[in-house]
Image (cartoon, rainbow, N blue to C red):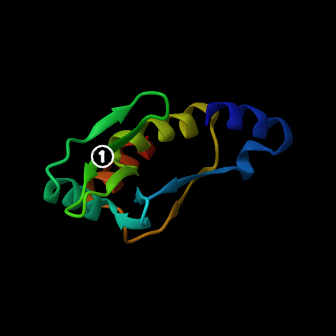
Amino acid sequence: MQKVIDYTITVVPKEKIFLGLAAYGYDWSSNGTKAYSVNGIYNLAANNNATILWDDVSKSPYFNYTDSNGISHSVWFENDKSISYKLDLVNSYNLSGVAIWRLGLENADYMNMIRTKFTK
């Protein structure tokens, strides 16, 4: 993400740049892909006894599980911890702000992190 910002600020004024944040996650499997809200993701992990892991390269949480039909799933999502890193980029580059897709799918922790990072 930092490399994309590094390039973008060379061709677009930073006051015109909003960083896009996802307020959801995807459950990927051979049966297709399903989107969930942030709380829906946590419920999915709990219902499948999945341990939430952390990918340090993408700065994103994820987990894997096998459903009752034996189908393997990989779930990637955003949460307050992952957007914290992204919000730090917005602040360090002095970008205009963030755009969230899609409001209503986030949880309180997610929105509290935005308030924390943007309160000066």
Q: Is residue 65 left or right of residue 86?
A: left
Residue lying at the far right in this picture: please name it: 11
Looking at this view, is 102 or 90 the one in front? Answer: 102
Give the x, y percent position of residue 28: 42, 57
Q: Could you tell me which quadrant the N terminus lies in?
A: top right
Give the x, y percent position of residue 77: 39, 51
Looking at this view, is 119 or 61 the one in front? Answer: 61
Q: Residue at x 44, y 34 (%)?
A: 59
Residue lying at the far bottom in this picture: please name it: 104
Q: Is residue 120 left or right of residue 62?
A: right
Q: Residue at x 41, y 67 (%)?
A: 34
Q: Could you tell me which quadrant the C terminus lies in?
A: top left
Residue 103 vs 52, above or below: the answer is below
Looking at this view, is 105 or 11 the one in front? Answer: 105
Looking at this view, is 88 or 28 the one in front? Answer: 28
Give the x, y percent position of residue 4: 70, 37
Residue lying at the far top in this picture: please name it: 56
Q: Residue at x 43, y 60 (%)?
A: 30
Residue 5 vs 102, above or below: the answer is above
- Displayed quadrant of residue 39: bottom left
Disc 1 element? strand
Q: Residue at x 64, y 43 (%)?
A: 95
Give the x, y percent position of residue 96: 64, 49
Q: Around disc 1, counting alpha carbons within 10 Å, would you say few (fewer than 14), some (14 to 19), or many (20 or more)?
A: many
* Residue type at tag 1: Asn
- Displayed quadrant of residue 38: bottom left
Provide the residue designation for mark 1. 64
Q: Is residue 31 left or right of residue 53?
A: right
Q: How many marks?
A: 1
- Displayed quadrant of residue 9: top right
